[in-house]
Image (cartoon, rainbow, N blue to C red):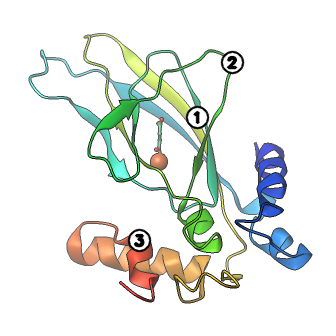
Amino acid sequence: MARIARKLFDALAVSKELCLDAEQRASYLEERGGTFRAYRYPARDTAAVVQYMGMEPHTDSSVLSILNQDLVGGLQVLRDGSTGWRRVRPVEGTLLVNLGDMMQAMSGDAYRSAVHRVVAPSSPGTERMSLCYFAFPEEDAVIVHPSAGCYRGFSCREFREQVQADIKATGAKVGLARFRLHP
Ligand SMILES: O=C(O)CCC(=O)C(=O)O
Ligand SMILES: [Fe+2]
């Protein structure tokens, strides 16, 4: 997964939206600093009246996240500027890539961090499994976009600490809005 993340990142890094130099390419994605998570979403026992949320709406704090979901389905994304959720149809033998908050910051909002959620299965006895790899920058690399000026420079460590402080204080992640220069 780390190698796939590196290949994808290097391909994006030369795009006009990122245009990273060699040093940024190396420090904005740290192969050994990735996190791997395995999830199991059991179905609700009783007949669900409302959709039962397996994971609440959020953006990933990563640079990019690579997801392997099974065929049960349940992942949904919010399209930019829309309030409607779209189901992400599982396709056997494929990986899914979500861009995260770090990518949005380093591209000066050209690439957006996808808001997504997981709806747990509704049929009793069904469960959903997924594997997710999250790629991050080096802890102390300062993320800046040379011209966009959307965000003040910040490191992944600072971002994580801010997210944790916000969750502790308010119960929710504030995320990139904390670092935006012109709210
Ligand atoms: O389980 C999934 O499909 C998504 C998990 C996810 O969005 C996350 O861990 O951030
Ligand atoms: Fe996520």
Residue 106: percent from left, percent from top: 65, 72
Mark 2 crowdedness (10 Å alpha carbons): few <14, some 14-19, many ≥20: few
Instruction: Compute the Cα span from label 1 to label 3.
Output: 23 Å
User: What residue is pinned by disc 2?
Assistant: 93
Q: Residue at x 59, y 67 (%)?
A: 102
> Looking at the rendering, which quadrant does residue 171 occupy?
bottom left
Query: Which residue is more in the foreground, 29 or 47?
Result: 29
Q: Secondary structure at mark 2?
A: loop
User: What residue is pinned by disc 3?
Assistant: 175
Q: Secondary structure at mark 1?
A: strand
- Amino acid marked by disc 1: Leu
In primary-sequence order, the first of circles 2 and 1 is 2
Residue 29: percent from left, percent from top: 75, 65
Residue 152: percent from left, percent from top: 54, 89
Mark 3 crowdedness (10 Å alpha carbons): few <14, some 14-19, many ≥20: some
Q: Residue at x 79, y 74 (%)?
A: 27
Rendered image: mark on residue 131: 1
- Amino acid marked by disc 3: Gly
In primary-sequence order, the first of circles 1 and 3 is 1
- Amino acid marked by disc 2: Gly
Q: Answer whether labels 1 and 3 touch (C-beta < 8 Å).
A: no
Mark 1 crowdedness (10 Å alpha carbons): few <14, some 14-19, many ≥20: some
